[in-house]
Image: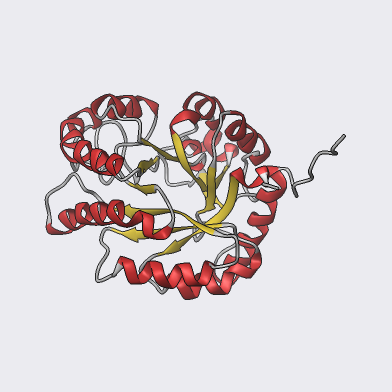
Amino acid sequence: MSNPILDIRIGTLVSGSNNPAEYIRQILPHGFESFQLTFWQTLGDTNLARLADKVNAVLEGSGAKISSVGMYGNPLESADIDRETIRGWEALIDNAHLFGTDIVCGFSGRLRDQSIPDSIPRFREVFHPLTERAAAKNVRIAFENCDMGGDWQRGDWNIALFPEAWELMFDAVPLANIGLEWEPCHQMVSLIDPMPQLREWVHRIFHVHGKCCTIKWDVVKKYGIHGKQQFAFHRTPGFGDCNWTDIISELREGGFKGSIDIEGWHDPVYKDALEMSGQVRSLNYLKDCRGGDFVPNPEV
């Protein structure tokens, strides 16, 4: 009997460059159901075929899977490292099937210190062929909604910040296999309520990062949002302000099938020696929010 609870898996992020097979082997017994393999700016000397063999061997028989692979850099600029990022996107698109996934994630890139509208022509130039390349291989592309310190007027790394930008991006590349790697935290740090946005955009969400946010409203009311006082903190799910029961309900109601992979190593409290303690607590919390264990209906 199939387990519809697993239409939405709960997992975590793993660096693709730092012996991911061994890392997965050590944390797999905690009950993670999926893993996103991530790369920063470049694949380096990674041989994706060999990496896939090692990772798949560790996962064999566990029921866990690779949810997605990701390349996080700036593919819209022209420095050597940016061209490496584009080559990384191409390689991940071509080799995603080796990991058993059809999703490649990352930043959209940005023309540095220029506005989001000014970056759209270059975005189309880079990602229209990449998205067509992905479509030919039955691969979907998903952009993380992290602002990376940017806004509408200027920034670096990413233009996929919020719905106004998504509309420009998806109009520029009007293909069905391009969408979002969404998380509520990146909206909350801009004081955006993530729930109405989730309901409107769930049909374009291919992958979810499990990261939450704590907002100190007393700081906002006293100091505002442009002073030296930090008012928003990235949190591991279960320790922040999000109601993940509501988030998962909206995802399921909207037809989402995929993974929520915890983006760890950001929590200001459950960090260092407490990192994996926080992640495993988050894993179990998210499983509870998902509905707990699958219980089949009586047959009458």
Residue drawn at 81 percent across, 39 percent down: 297
- Residue found at the very far front of the displayed protein: 300
Residue 219 appears in which quarter of the rendering?
A: top right
- Which x, y percent locates residue 187? 47, 36
- Which x, y percent locates residue 295? 79, 45
- Which x, y percent locates residue 284? 69, 55
Q: How is the image coloured?
A: secondary structure
Between 65 and 237, the residue placed more toward the observer is 65
Left or right of 273 in this view: 96: left
Left or right of 162 in this view: 251: right
Left or right of 126 in this view: 186: right
Is residue 63 positioned above or below 176 on the image? below
Q: How many labels were placed on the picture?
A: 0
> The C terminus is located in which quarter?
top right
Residue drawn at 45 percent across, 69 percent down: 55
Is residue 90 positioned above or below 220 on the image? below
- Which x, y percent locates residue 35? 50, 58
Residue 186 visible in the picture: no
Residue drawn at 47 percent across, 39 percent down: 189
Residue drawn at 84 percent across, 38 percent down: 299
Residue 18 visible in the picture: yes
Between 149 and 44, the residue placed more toward the observer is 44
Between 273 and 57, the residue placed more toward the observer is 57
Residue 227 appears in which quarter of the rendering?
A: top left
Residue 142 appears in which quarter of the rendering?
A: top left
